[in-house]
Amino acid sequence: MRLNCPICGERDRREFYYKGDAVELDRPDPNAGSEAWDDYLHNRDNPAGETRDLWHHESGCGAWLVVTRNTLTHEVLRCELAGANTQ
Amino acid sequence: MRIAGKGLNPNAKPLTFTFDGRTYTGLEGDTLASALLANGVRLVGRSFKYHRPRGILTAGSEEPNALVTTGEGPAQDPNQRATTLELYDGLVARSQNAWPSLKYDAMAINDIASPFLSAGFYYKTFMWPQSFWEKLYEPIIRRAAGLGALSGQANEDLYEKVFAHCDVLVIGAGPSGIMAALTAARAGADVILADESSEYGGRLLSETFDVGGQPGANWVADQIAELAAMDNVRLMSRTTVTGAYDQGTFGALEQLNARGGPKECFWRIVCKHSVLCAGALERPIAFPNNDRPGIMMASAVRSYLNRCGVAPGRTVSVFCNNDDAHRTAVDLIDAGVDVAAVIDSRTDAPTMGQYRLIKGGRVIGTKGRHRVTHVSVSTAEGIEHISTDCLAMSGGWNPTVHLTCHMNGRPDWNDAVLSFVPGENAVPNMSVAGSAAGHMSTLACLTSGAEIGADVARGLCLSPKVVVPTAEDAPYRIEALWQVEGKGRKWLDFQNDVHVKDVQLAAQENFRSVEHMKRYTTQGMATDQGKNSNVQALAVLADATGRGIPDTGTTTFRPPYVPVSIGAMGAGGQGKGFAPERLTTSHQASVDRGAPMIEAGLWYRPSYFPKPTETTWLDSCNREVGYVRNAVGVCDVSTLGKIDIQGPDAAAFLDFVYCNTFSTLKENRVRYGLMLREDGHVMDDGTTARIGPNHYVMTTTTAAAGQVMTHLEWVAQALRPDLNVRFASVTEHWAQFAIAGSKARELLNTMLDDPIDDDQWPFMSCGVVSLGGVSARLFRISFSGEHAYELAVPARFGASLFRQLVAQAEGMGGGAYGMEALNVLRIEKGFITHAEIHGRITAFDLGLDRLVSQKKDCIGNAASRREGLLAPQREQLVGLKPVDKAGKMTAGAHLFGNGADAVSANDQGYVTSVCFSPTLGHSIGMGFLIDGPNRIGERIQLVDHMRDVQTLCEVCSPVFFDPDGGRARG
């Protein structure tokens, strides 16, 4: 698998570290309450289809990326800088 | 038997090799199989289960029988196919799965007992008592059955791995592959053409066809010469494409022929388009005793004859259901070899040459112990026994669809070729050409290769031209013939000893799904993965279950297409390649002093520095602790992570990643920081120094340096892109040494250009100092509880500084100390490491909850306030000491109430760190105990079930020494 790092270009997946679902970008307000924090920390969807994941280009430029891919076809649809996705 | 004038290399040099201890001569260009056949060796192996005598069946990588072991000692390499193993001078090969010898194999008794060893025999027989399976049954079965064995020693052969990229990967260099590669490459595409053989050309090397008006092999040589001259083409022989993966990625195994260098190379090839030209594999016919040595595939007989100049028999018969196999007889007769008969199951079989043709005939039995001597043929007139020493069989051809199934694609049944052909778009951007797609004549292969090569080139916006040479275009005439009636076992899977009745029994016992049948009978397993038996087995299963073959379907073809050694896939990942060494600047000095080095992640650190008079590590450790407590010790602490943080928002950033506050830290001051994970548990701790208005240096633990750096990147980029801050790891840039003990400042002042004093350099201060003109950073921090400093210099000065510091310390009654002493010093002071912050620990558990500032948001703040994380039933940090001073303590032990049973229901906590404190004269420990801080003075049992330790301990403060910290400040 290769990911198209917006800074470095297409690179082998061995250069990247996988973190998890991109919901981690939507950090709740500190006082959002335990339910919101529980969701943020622990609850994840497991979609058959399009999913957004966080990857770190740790053996490359160090950029954190949001990778949109399809879990059914393994297609990588988009690869964006995580900073651009922060709410 | 060599046939003079036949073979592609008339000037081949002779080579000497041995097989099972006997010396033979072969020729350059031979495989081990062709060389053995040339020497009249027919019996080459014993079968997996029944130990039946077996000979060479094929001339390719699909070979199920002729598996041999080469190499000695650690280089022993089992299960190599004699049919692909290129002969070299001095090759030593041994047969497998036979004892005491290949000819007289004791385990052949299994063959006589075979009526009891039907499919599922082991499952049905060795069911009880259950405990016997692991200790008795399985070892016996494993010894009796099997293929070659590994040496048990670490393999020392070299392997390589390489990445390659191209526009077009053409898999297979037969007629269609060559045309696809030529057409795409002439148009300008960047092409890789890979073929598993040592020579390009595929079947054209094994047949007597003309292409473009010249012999096929000559045509191949011309095209390959053209391709080799192009800069945009990479030719890869001896390279089997083993798997198709996402995004046009392919695995490929290259056998490297040069002895002395790497043995194999595993390629990862990334392409925009792939063209599968893998050809087709001929399949056997299931007739009684069809597995005797001398019974071979008809196409293999032609390969050995036409390519190697070897006739596998003196009087050859052919048994087939299609026109193609007749050419075997024609070629043999042209070469002067006798053909006893061509037995064709079709009543309307055509005659293609001067040989005896038996139409509508079937081979219903064979004779011959170690090689075939007779075949029994059933015809309309009755049964005839034909004397023959080689039977060439052909049940038709199976397109090699394997790679098209590696990404969940399913092949389609095709009635015209009576086999499976690749499904549509089975692998993204892969096209299939030639006989792999079911095109069975040479012209059809050339044409489909050229057309697909052109399609692919057009897809790359190039302008290809399609030029196809003339070639034979005979129709592929075949009738269905999967098994022949008659008594005796009709073998399907030669490698796993599966015969027709086994498959029928599976169906009868309701293992009707093809996947269940496979696992019940072992059909299609092991090194050949049923390449030449799967389709017949499906046909038999379809018949037994009353379904058609298309409804029966196939098992799943998975990578790799041929066996790939783990050594090749893991090339570069052995030893230091798996775990590279990180060495500190003081490494050589430590080794020179005889220090045993211990691993800390990838780092190597000195455990202790032994003196000649000391007999145990503890003697050395106790002495080194004494240096620090009584004089001065020096320790390399460069392995701690160092992160340089700068920017106008550096302070705000630190406030957000640490649970305590750093924006209030004054310049030239250092503060302890605790870093949480977002779930409220402790990630790491360390000190951070403010060395300028917007400039900080953070230290992390050695263990978590990488994790913290990744975390900071995450927070800065993803959560707080609003903050203007930049940081970089400078761990390797600075060599840093702890100088600890009451004489620490005295030592420093012997070396610093300007002496320091307590007023300018109080506890937790930092700044720039000068050492012989070299600018250095000095931090007055302590991990030992003593008056101590850490001195950091650019790494190039580290080696000399360490030697000087140690020399000065030794002159003052101190010296170097290692990890063991460092650990004792920190446990005496109750300082935590990753033994304590092991991932399930909160700031509250450590008694550090007051550090979690409630004035600001930070990572982990919200979650650290969760219900249950602050309750007294949490296990919290305490110190432990034995009631009897001689009492033994162990890390990993659990804690139980005094008098309570030491069972998990009564578990009160556990011990994380333990040492013998020379300062206090007894063992001390740290651990986590339910409501620990409120139980100081209580007596509790320490129980280590693993090491059989039981010690009554007293709960105490984790700070055993100098609890008010006066020594560090003084």
Image (cartoon, rainbow, N blue to C red):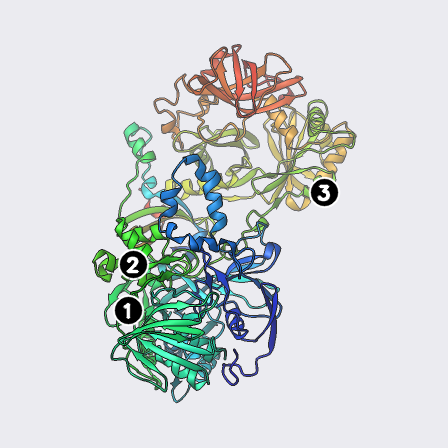
Residue B468: x %, y % from top left: 34, 83
For residue B89, side relative to residue B452 (left or right): right
Foreground label between 2 and 1: 1
Point 25% across, 80% down: residue: B348
Kindly state the secondary structure of the residue where label 1 is placed.
Answer: loop
Residue B761: x %, y % from top left: 64, 28
Name the mark on residue B930.
none
Foreground label between 3 and 2: 2
Residue B801 appears in view: no
Which residue is tagged 3?
B800
Q: Circles 3 and 2: CB distance less than 8 Å?
A: no
Q: Nearer the viewer, residue B105 or B325?
A: B105
Which is nearer the N-term, disc 2 or disc 1? 1
Measure how far apart labels 2 and 1 are at the Cα level. 18 Å
Which is nearer the N-term, disc 3 or disc 2? 2
Which residue is tagged 1?
B481
Which residue is tagged 2?
B554
Name the image quarter holding the C terminus of chain B: top right
Measure how far apart labels 3 and 2 are at the Cα level. 69 Å
Point 29% across, 30% down: residue: A32
For residue B547, side relative to residue B587 (left or right): left
Which is nearer the N-term, disc 3 or disc 1? 1
Point 50% across, 48% down: residue: B143
